[in-house]
Image (cartoon, helix red, strand yellow):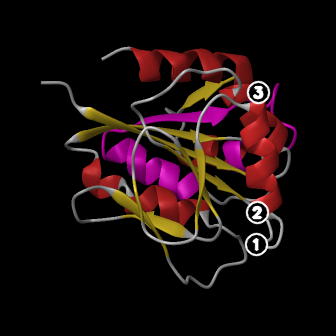
Amino acid sequence: MRKSKLVLIGASTGGPGHLNRLLKDINNSDVPIVIAQHMNTVFIPYFVSQFGRGINMEITEVSQRELLSGKVFICSKTSVVSEDTPLSIIPKDVASIYNPNINVLFHSAVHICGFIDVLAILLTGIGDDGAKGLFDLYRAGATCIAESEESAIVYGMPKKAKEINPDVNVMHLDNIRTRLESFLYVF
């Protein structure tokens, strides 16, 4: 029996363009992809609409509890992976300077790493959001990737992830895409 899979992606400054490069024309019908892109909630619906035109997958804005299925879920605010089955993503009211908070999302998936294959990707961005959560996932057995300085528009969040965990996989965006495709297609 094959394990279920889940992809978690966190991004900030420069993220929308990188997310488009990462997911454009990827065929995926089985694996949920949850994205926490730092953005004011006012702009999320526009981002979802524009992003949906550039990729070949169904996209859902997470504004209420959503069952995780083989499509892209964009968090409109800080969200968590449920502790209940069936697996779902749930928006939460969390005080944070980041919206949505990547650390909260990443940390919320630690509990599923024993029975679901998790791929967590931390892309370009200012600050350190996502670095601690990525390390928590790494320690729980998830495959964790931080974007390299060469391809990151702002090498803040991925740099902090590398500082916290020198063993994290650091990759150029193009190589992250190759690794993502392999994760999605190989069971």
Q: Is residue 120 visible?
A: yes
Q: How many marks?
A: 3
Q: Quadrant of residue 121?
A: top right
Q: Which residue is mark 2?
A: 44
In whole angstroms, how far apart are the C-alphas of marks 3 and 1?
Answer: 23 Å
In whole angstroms, how far apart are the C-alphas of marks 2 and 1?
Answer: 5 Å
Task: Please tell me whether mark 2 sits on a helix, a strand or a loop.
Answer: helix
Upstream in the sequence, badge 3 or badge 1?
3
Residue 82: image location, x then y, percent: 33, 65
Q: Which residue is mark 1?
A: 41
**Which residue: 84% across, 37% down?**
17
Please give the label number shown on residue 49: none
Residue 38: image location, x then y, percent: 74, 60
**Which residue: 40% across, 48% down?**
137
Task: Sort mark 3 into few (<14), some (14-19) or many (20+) by Cα contacts within 10 Å.
Answer: some
Judging depth in this view, the residue of 70 and 79 nearest the camera is 70
Give left or right: position of 76 versus 46. Answer: left
Q: Amino acid at mark 3?
A: Arg
Upstream in the sequence, badge 3 or badge 2?
3
Give left or right: position of 171 versus 6. Answer: right
**Which residue: 42% across, 16% down?**
185
Q: Amino acid at mark 2?
A: Ile
Q: Which residue is mark 3?
A: 21
Judging depth in this view, the residue of 176 and 134 nearest the camera is 176
**Which residue: 65% across, 60% down?**
129
